[in-house]
Image (cartoon, rainbow, N blue to C red):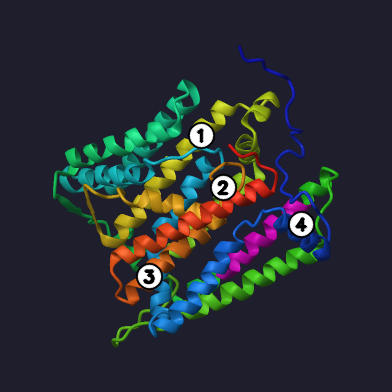
Amino acid sequence: MSVRTNAAPDPLVGDLIGSGMEGGVREQFDAWLQRLRGGEMGALPAIGGLVVLTILFTILSPYFLTAGNFANLLNQAATLVMLGMALVFVLLLGEIDLSAGVTGGVAMAIFIVLNDSFGVNWILALAIGFAFGLATGALIGFFVARVGIPSFVVTLGLFLGYQGLALLIIGSGGLYRLQVPELIALQNSNLPVWGGWVMLVIMLAVSATTSFWDRARRTRAGVANRALSLVWIKLGVIAVIGGVVVYLLNLNRSSSIIPVEGVPIIVPVVLVILWIGTFTLDRTRFGRYIYAIGGNAEAARRAGVKVRWVKWWAFVLCSTLAVLAGLFSVARIASVDAAAGRDIVLSGVAAAVVGGVSLFGGRGRLMHAAIGALVIAMITNGLGLLNLPAGINLLVTGGVLILAATVDALSRLRSGGART
């Protein structure tokens, strides 16, 4: 028999963002070093991997560090970035969703078949596809949160079953073409040159507004704030890195007389979803509850957190975002077949883990999954430029995942986690 308590996190300060160690630049740096010594490395190994891979592939291939390949890399990574971010919501709870990839694949099969074969308006057909993803997440959440079946078992069952459903919808060896130019443009068109700079200005404005809003909330709650200089440093970093990226993507990367330039449309789309997801996890009570449950589900329950409800919604979000990842994939190749999404889910888990999201729950951010996805996409892209066989790509990716999981386990032990 479960015992409910009336205790609950303070509603005023429970969803305020903060590192637990506020202060100036020096205090933040010292706190970061302390966390690093304690084993909390976050995305540092993945960022190091990006630097090493960039240097390595630049040396090995003259085509790697070019504007054309850079834009191609971002388009290639978009699907994996989105799927990795989707999985973060359940990985933070210490759960897993092995069906995320095929959920997106089946949803896209439903969408394209309805639109192509039955003449359903593409907006309505796409909405039905997303409804399928939402219903799948609700079903998984019911079995995991209410019935108590391990998420591995439930999602593995759906992973197998949905492959059969895809075959029934599309047929063995069948393929349907995407006939919606607006969706194809997501992965195959670019913003105008001025659009990239507008995107950067909006990013800076949103980041500044969010930072000062956080400071105002913390001041009203009587909670310590970080030094204002840290806000300007963050904005400066965004301006410099963003400016370099926009400049490179605005270069003409066409070898013909027709110019190809501008930031790929998929980039601002992914950034908007990344910001919304990060805002949800960092600045809402729901997000803080996800971290609390991942850290200690029983303690969160005793504090009054509705653990079942939070888990249910986490799986709903994961499956819905997985459909969006499926849409990105279909938009890139402009077609869908019965195998859509079958192989990518493990790469999505790998992206999150490589980026620093803990498989044990309670630690990680959406940005970490995005960085991990870029690492994996860079491996695939670079090895492809070197004309190495696909088997090498799988071997390297698998080795990187094992290394990342090992680092995660060791860092957890070092920071005080118990060995199971």
Q: Secondary structure at mark 3?
A: helix
Q: Earlier in the sequence, mark 1 or mark 4?
A: 4
Circle 3 is placed at which residue position?
381
Q: Main secondary structure of the magenta part?
A: helix
Dot label at residue 34: 4
The extreme top residue here reads 1
Q: Residues within 10 Å of mark 4 (few under 14, many from 20)?
A: few
Q: Which residues are magenta?
A: 200-215
Q: Of the residues tagged 1 and 2, which is closer to the observer? A: 2
Quadrant occupied by the N terminus: top right
Amino acid type at mark 1:
Trp
* Residue at point 33%, 72% (across, down): 384
Q: CA distance from mark 4 to mark 3?
A: 36 Å
Which is more toward the observer, 166 or 59?
59
Q: CA distance from mark 1 to mark 2?
A: 20 Å
Amino acid type at mark 2:
Ser
Q: Answer yes or no: do the residues labelled 4 and 2 have beta carbons within 8 Å?
A: no
Which is more toward the observer, 121 or 46?
46
In the image, residue 218 lies at what x, y percent?
A: 79, 48
* Residue at point 61%, 62% (across, down): 44
Task: Judge from the rendering whether residue 260 lies leftward or rightward of residue 2; answer left or right.
Answer: left
Q: Residues within 10 Å of mark 3 (few under 14, many from 20)?
A: many
206 inside magenta stretch = yes
Circle 1 is placed at which residue position?
313
Residue 236 visible in the current orientation:
yes
Q: Earlier in the sequence, mark 1 or mark 2?
A: 1
